[in-house]
Image (cartoon, rainbow, N blue to C red):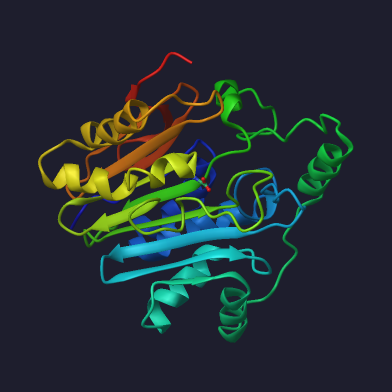
Amino acid sequence: MADPIIISTWSFGKRSHDAVWPALIDGASSLDTVEKVCRIAEDDPAIDSVGYGGRPDREGRMTLDGCIMLQPRQCGAVACVRRHRHPVSIARQVMERTDHVMLVGPLADDFADACDMPAEPMLSPEAKAAFDARARGAAGPPPAPMDNPSGALFPDEEPWRNHDTIGTLCIDQRGTLAGACSTSGMAWKVPGRVGDSPIIGHGLYVRPGVGAATGTGTGELVMGECGAFLAVERMALGDTPTEACVAVVQRIVDAGPLEPHETVAMIALAADGTWGSASIRPGYRTSIKSLTQDDARTAHRVLLDS
Ligand code: GLY
């Protein structure tokens, strides 16, 4: 029997971990676990970059992206979902009920309808207020604290607000790896924009027997390097999870100058249960829950000072 472990991007993953842990140690599958981790974040109006709390595009319309993966022949993804709050669950239905990997736009919503998934309100009052304030040219209300109502736990996560993702990786008691990813994408994006998160090999990759990787940050940068696939390939070639994550973020940094708002963090979980992370900039944390760890910790390696 394997020791179960879950890692997720950002400290807000910790809330989801606490909720799914009892079932995971009671034998729940890694696939069910990663779906549930994302669903909890997708429902949380305090998380301003995923699901219901996410910020809309520049026209004020919410579009959501997500994917889920067990192995290269078992993965599903959706992008630009407009009426359903749980892209991760639609992605799972794509994986389990179709011969395809990815559905996009209104037809992905239609597929969710056909799977009896309810359409739900997509834009939280906070997100609507932020959009309205932006449209008026005002700074808008202060964003809800990302981590807890006091906002005091992890104030150094502040710089990345409005641009992140929940990516989650899990090994269950049977030793099965799974991963999932969910995002509302870049705040105020050009309508139709899709980032790395729902793209298999970019925002998420899982190779049984080797490991899994996912990331958060500026999707366009991750897509330029096939980030999650690259991290898993590096583990296949012998890198530790942290070395694999460093390889991805280092390539992004080496590829050219970054805008001040651009950044990426990667996390990786090897099939043996070891895990690692790397971030281009400070201010990022990974949530980790296992039999011996229950934490939200800063990246193992951070490449730049700010
Ligand atoms: N990493 C999420 C996005 O760029 O959409």
Q: Residue at x 59, y 78 (%)?
A: 107
Q: Quadrant of the N terminus?
A: bottom left
Q: Residue at x 60, y 22 (%)?
A: 155
Q: Nearer the viewer, residue 123 or 116?
A: 123
Q: Specify the quadrant of the image occupied by residue 26.
A: bottom left
Q: Specify the quadrant of the image occupied by residue 304.
A: top left
Relative placement, left or right, of 220 versus 170 is right
| Relative image position of residue 48 (x, y in whole percent) | 66, 43
Relative placement, left or right, of 248 versus 181 is left
Q: Is residue 247 above or below residue 60?
A: above
Query: From this viewpoint, which residue is outermost toward the left?
Result: 238
Q: Is residue 175 above or below residue 78?
A: above
Q: Specify the quadrant of the image occupied by residue 62.
A: bottom right
Query: From this viewpoint, which residue is outermost toward the top?
Result: 305
| Relative image position of residue 128 (x, y in whole percent) | 81, 49
Query: From this viewpoint, which residue is outermost toward the front?
Result: 256
| Relative image position of residue 122 (x, y in whole percent) | 72, 60
Relative placement, left or right, of 16 versus 145 is left
Q: Residue at x 61, y 45 (%)?
A: 49
Q: Is residue 17 above or below residue 10?
A: below
| Relative image position of residue 213 (x, y in whole percent) | 31, 47
Relative placement, left or right, of 283 versus 62 is left
Q: Nearer the viewer, residue 251 or 271?
A: 251
